[in-house]
Amino acid sequence: MKIEHIDNRYGQSAVENFWIIGGGKFGLRAAKALSKKHPLTNLTIVEKEKAVCKQLGRLGFETVCMDGIQYLERNLVSVSHPDWIVPAIPLHTAYEWIKTKLSKNHSINRIAVPQDLVTELPNPINAEFGQLYISIADFKCPGNCPEPDEICTHTGKPRPMVLHEFLKSIQRKDLKTVVIRSHQLAPGVGGYPPQTLFAALNEIEAAQEPVVLSTACSCHGVIDAFQLSKR
C-alpha cells in the first residue's frame, strides 16, 4: 500500500492517480489543492452536471461527465488503481458504492444507527439521505486545516480523540462495525485507496449482523447503518 508515502507535511510522494468524485465547490477545491501539492499527478474529476463539467474543462481539469457512483461501479475494478479516491459529493460515497456492488445478490435495508450508540458519538447530526454525520468539533473548521497529529488547528488544544480510531474501538455482538479511514492528502482534502473499499466490501458481505459503516478522518465522519440479506 502507498499510504505511507503521504504524511501531514505533504512531501514528495509516489502517488500518481487521483479520482475526485464530485466537481462542485469541494471537488474543485480538492482538485486545486492536489494539483498544487502534486503537480505531476494524473487527476480525474467525475461530475454529473454538464455545466459544471464544462467549467472544469475550461479550467484545464480532466473531467468525466457522469454520476460519480456509477463511474466507480463501472471503473473501480482494481485494488491498485487509482491510488486515491477523493469523495466530494453530498452522499456517503463508500456506502453508495458498496450498496451498488452488493445489490445484485443482496437486499440492503437502511436502518437507524442504534440510539445507545448515537449517545457515544461526538456531535451527531442526522442528514437528509439517512446518514449520520459526526464531528469532534462543535464549530466550523477552517477549509485548509492540515489535520495535525495532536493539536486542533482552530482551538490550539489537544484533540479529544482520533475519530477513526474511536469508531474502530466500538465492538458489539449485535453489530458489525466497519470503518474506512480518510487520509489527508492536502490541506482540507481527504481520501482513501481502493484497497480499503474492497476490504470493507468483503467484510460487509460476510456479515451476519446489522452493519454500521463509517468513513472518518481524525476529526469528522459519516455513518450509515443497514441490514444485509441474500435474495
Image (tube, helix red, strand yellow):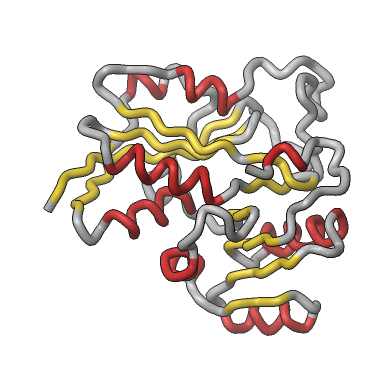
Who's the residue at 65% across and 69% down the image? 45
User: Residue 58 location, x and y as percent?
Assistant: 78, 83
Who's the residue at 68% across and 41% down the image? 3
Vertical placement of 13 versus 221: above or below?
below
Who's the residue at 63% across and 62% down the image? 19
User: Residue 176 location, x and y as percent?
Assistant: 32, 28
Who's the residue at 35% across and 43% down the image? 202
The reply, left or right, for residue 133 in relation to residue 203 is right
Vertical placement of 28 versus 216: above or below?
below
User: Residue 86 location, x and y as percent?
Assistant: 62, 54
Residue 218: name its quadrant: top right
Label tally:
0
**Residue nearest the observer in this picture, 125 or 206:** 206
Vertical placement of 230 versus 126: above or below?
below
Q: Quadrant of the N terminus?
A: top right
Residue 157: name its quadrant: top right
User: Residue 135 location, x and y as percent?
Assistant: 59, 30
The reply, left or right, for residue 105 in relation to residue 69 is left
